Each structure stands twice: as structure tokens, then as C-alpha cells.
Image (spheres, helix red, strand yellow):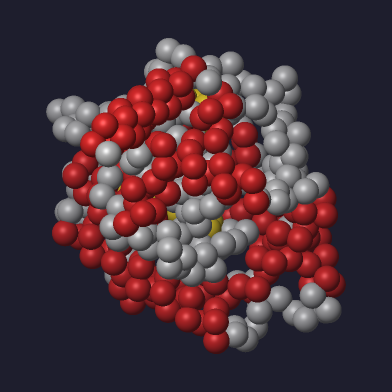
């Protein structure tokens, strides 16, 4: 019996080491190990590191993954492997959010909103912008990332991207996700492999998704390196027209003139989470800026009309999320930047700001967002403020 136990332990250790080494060279193995669709949980209170947080993000790519040519860092974040202490004479900005600050439509890194934001802020003084955003996440993730990672970086400012399209509605908690067994899965790769194989065997993918590129190894592992842009021109739309429109139609629940009790409960949870982010930022001595990111339906009148028709002609209150958020943030004394008015004005002038059938900004949208965020941050961080 003792010999059997020893053999089991030896095999377990060998499997763990083999998986960790194999993930460095095998793209297929990484796809399985970093499969996230089985983990949509939103609580995160028991997660205590940035790496474990990104491991819990249901669309995370994992450490040193390739995100449209950009090599993620050791924690699976779209930034460099930064030092804990900042360089003397350098401002430090922490960015939190979802895919709007990560993949963002597959644009080139030079056009990416965080790259442009870094360049714009650097014209005044050396500025380090650390992107702690993760795809497929929401406000509770942002708060926990700030607590476990953002605070210890001692930032001058915290930028939170709040996407109207789904950050109001992704608060439900999967009760099993952060049980001890689930947390174990974020650390022990043998357990993770078994969990994800079971999930892949029972998972039915969205037939509307068109995978834009294969997962390619990033070797040597150089966090923040920019490799060849994976598309010869612009990337193909991520969704079919039917799938993309269904997504926009489903998101439009936040534009209902009268919200259902379930949505009101979710809004209450969002308010509590945003208040927590404000409190954590204040304790850290950082200025907080909430960037309210509009949904494409709010910017594109033709799309709004199509969504309205699909919903039986019920009028949409397209400004309702911004009104509620604006009133709450003013009440809390939190600085906010609402991108909706300028995005609408540019769209009305014929400027395309979104990737086709994607929902993320194209290069023009990235540029506009970066310019506006940089200007608001400069005003927020000005001496005497």
C-alpha cells in the first residue's frame, strides 16, 4: 500500500512537471490547459495573485500567450513583465477592464488604445501604463485585480474601463467556481488538464464564432514583444452577421426604458463593486478615472433601428446606462469620462469607429479613446488637483 502511494505521488509530480514543460513548446497543449469557457465565475474573493486571476478569466490566453502579435506577460496580461518599484521620475498608471483594453478588435499594437495612451501621456513626462485588463471579465474582476495587484504597484492613477454592453449584466456568481477544488485547478496543472478535457468533451461551441488565428508559440518568451501582425490586411470579422446581431440584440436589455427586477439587482451589485473600487483606490492614494465605454448600438443609428425592430418596435432608451452611471459616480465623487457623445459625433460625421461585426474599436476608435483618456488623465493629475 505504501509503495502504491509512493508511485502515485511520483506519477503526479512527473505529470505536473511534464505539463509545465510541454506547455512551453506545444500549442495544442496550451489550448487545452488555458481553456476558460468552463469558468465564468465572478466572485474572485479567494484569488490572491494576478496569475490566478487571469487563469480564472474565462477567455484568458495564459502566460506568454500571443494576442494578435503581442506577447502577454508572465501573468497572461497585455503588458510587460514589470518591476514592482517604479523608475524614479516616472508616473505609473494602472488600467483595468475587459477585452476593450486587451484584444480590441485585432488592431496592430501601434494602434492599440493602451499603446497610444502611453505615448500621449509620455509627451508630458515619463509615464508607465500597466495594462491589467483581461478578456471576458467584469467589474468584480476589476476590483479584485486592483486589490491583489494594482495596489501593490502604487499607481498615481487607476483607469477602469466600464463597457456598457455587458459590464452591467455579468455579475451572476457561479457558486462552484471558487470552491477549494476550483482554486486548486488554477495552480495544479494535472487537475486543470482533467477539468478542461471533461469540459471540451461536453462543450458545444457557438457556431457563429470564426476563430481568427491559431494559437502560436511565443518563443523565446519576451513579454511585451510585438511579433509580426498575424493578418495580411484587416482581420476577418470575428462573428457571422447572425451571431453578431444576436449579441447586440441580447445586450440591448440595458436600454429598456423600464428595467426588470433582475437587472435592477445587477445594477445594485455593480454600484457596490464600483464603490469598492473607489475605496481601494483612495486607500492606495491613486486618482480613479472610470471610462464609460459605449456599446456600438448607442453609436450606430442603423444598428439601433435594426435592434429596435427585432425587439418588436419597443423604443430603446440609449442613454439610460450613462445617466445612471453618471449620477452614481458624481454622487461618489469619482471622476468619469463618458466617450458616448464624441463617438456619436464622429460616427455622425461618417467616421467608422468599430471593426465589422466585432463590437471592438478599429484603429480610429482606439485613437479617439486614447486621446480623450489621456487628456482627462492629464487634467486629473495636474498639480493642485
Q: Say which residue appears at 71% left-offset and 61% top-offset.
A: 248
Residue at x 56% of width, y 62% of height: 166
Q: Residue at x 49, y 53 (%)?
A: 39
Residue 27 in view, yes or no: yes
Quadrant of the snapshot with the N terminus: top left
Direction from residue 314 to residue 132 in the image, left or right: left
Task: Pick the residue in front: 292 or 237.
Answer: 237
Residue 183 or 239: which is nearer the viewer?
Answer: 183
Q: Residue at x 78, y 81 (%)?
A: 314
Does residue 92 appear in the picture of this structure? no
Q: Position of residue 213 (x, y in %)?
A: 67, 28
Disc count in the image? 0
- Which quadrant of the structure image shows residue 297? bottom right
Relative vertical location of residue 132 with respect to residue 182 in this rendering, above or below: above
Query: In this picture, is 103 found above or below 162?
Result: above
The furthest residue to the front: 1
Please provide percent x and percent y for residue 15: 39, 28
Residue situated in front as seen by the camera: 126 or 283:
283
Quadrant position of the C terminus in the picture: bottom left
Residue 273 figure quarter: bottom left
345, above or below 93, in the image: below
Residue 359 is situated, as x and y percent measured from the top left of the image, at 66, 50
Residue 80, given in percent of the width and then of the height, sits at: 35, 27
Answer left or right for 224 relative to 360.
left
Amino acid at each position: 500500500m505504501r509503495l502504491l502511494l509512493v508511485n502515485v505521488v511520483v506519477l503526479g509530480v512527473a505529470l505536473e512537471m511534464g505539463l509545465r514543460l510541454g506547455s512551453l513548446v506545444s500549442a495544442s497543449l496550451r489550448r487545452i490547459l488555458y481553456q476558460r469557457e468552463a469558468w465564468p465565475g465572478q466572485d474572485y474573493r479567494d484569488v490572491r495573485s494576478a496569475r490566478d486571476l487571469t487563469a480564472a478569466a474565462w477567455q484568458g490566453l495564459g502566460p506568454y500567450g500571443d494576442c494578435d502579435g503581442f506577447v502577454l506577460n508572465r501573468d497572461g496580461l497585455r503588458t510587460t513583465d514589470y518591476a514592482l518599484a517604479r523608475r524614479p521620475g516616472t508616473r505609473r498608471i494602472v488600467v483595468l477592464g475587459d477585452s476593450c483594453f486587451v484584444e480590441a478588435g485585432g488592431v496592430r499594437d501601434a494602434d492599440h488604445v493602451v499603446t497610444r495612451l502611453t505615448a500621449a501621456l509620455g509627451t508630458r513626462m515619463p509615464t508607465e501604463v500597466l495594462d491589467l485588463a483581461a478578456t471576458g471579465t467584469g467589474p468584480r474582476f476589476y476590483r479584485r485585480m486592483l486589490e491583489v495587484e494594482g495596489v501593490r504597484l502604487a499607481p498615481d492613477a487607476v483607469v477602469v474601463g466600464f463597457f456598457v454592453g455587458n459590464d452591467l449584466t455579468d455579475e451572476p456568481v457561479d457558486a462552484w467556481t471558487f470552491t477549494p477544488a476550483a482554486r486548486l485547478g488554477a495552480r495544479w496543472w494535472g487537475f486543470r488538464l482533467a477539468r478542461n478535457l471533461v469540459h471540451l468533451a461536453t462543450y458545444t461551441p457557438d457556431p457563429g464564432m470564426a476563430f481568427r488565428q491559431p494559437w502560436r508559440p511565443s518563443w523565446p518568451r519576451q513579454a511585451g514583444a510585438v511579433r509580426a501582425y498575424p493578418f495580411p490586411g484587416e482581420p476577418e470579422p470575428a462573428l457571422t452577421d447572425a451571431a453578431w446581431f444576436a449579441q447586440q440584440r441580447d445586450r440591448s436589455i440595458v436600454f429598456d426604458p423600464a428595467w426588470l427586477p433582475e437587472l435592477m439587482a445587477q445594477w445594485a451589485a455593480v454600484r457596490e463593486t464600483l464603490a469598492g473600487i473607489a475605496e481601494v483606490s483612495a486607500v492606495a492614494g491613486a486618482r480613479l478615472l472610470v471610462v464609460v465605454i459605449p456599446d456600438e448600438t448607442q453609436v450606430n443609428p442603423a444598428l439601433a433601428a435594426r435592434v429596435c425592430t427585432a425587439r418588436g418596435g419597443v423604443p430603446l432608451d440609449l442613454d439610460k446606462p450613462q445617466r445612471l452611471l453618471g449620477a452614481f459616480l458624481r454622487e461618489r465623487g469619482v471622476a468619469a469620462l463618458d466617450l458616448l457623445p464624441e463617438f456619436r459625433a464622429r460616427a455622425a460625421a461618417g467616421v467608422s469607429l468599430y471593426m465589422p461585426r466585432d463590437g471592438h474599436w478599429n484603429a480610429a476608435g482606439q485613437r479617439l479613446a486614447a486621446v480623450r483618456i489621456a487628456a482627462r488623465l492629464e487634467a486629473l493629475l495636474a498639480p493642485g488637483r
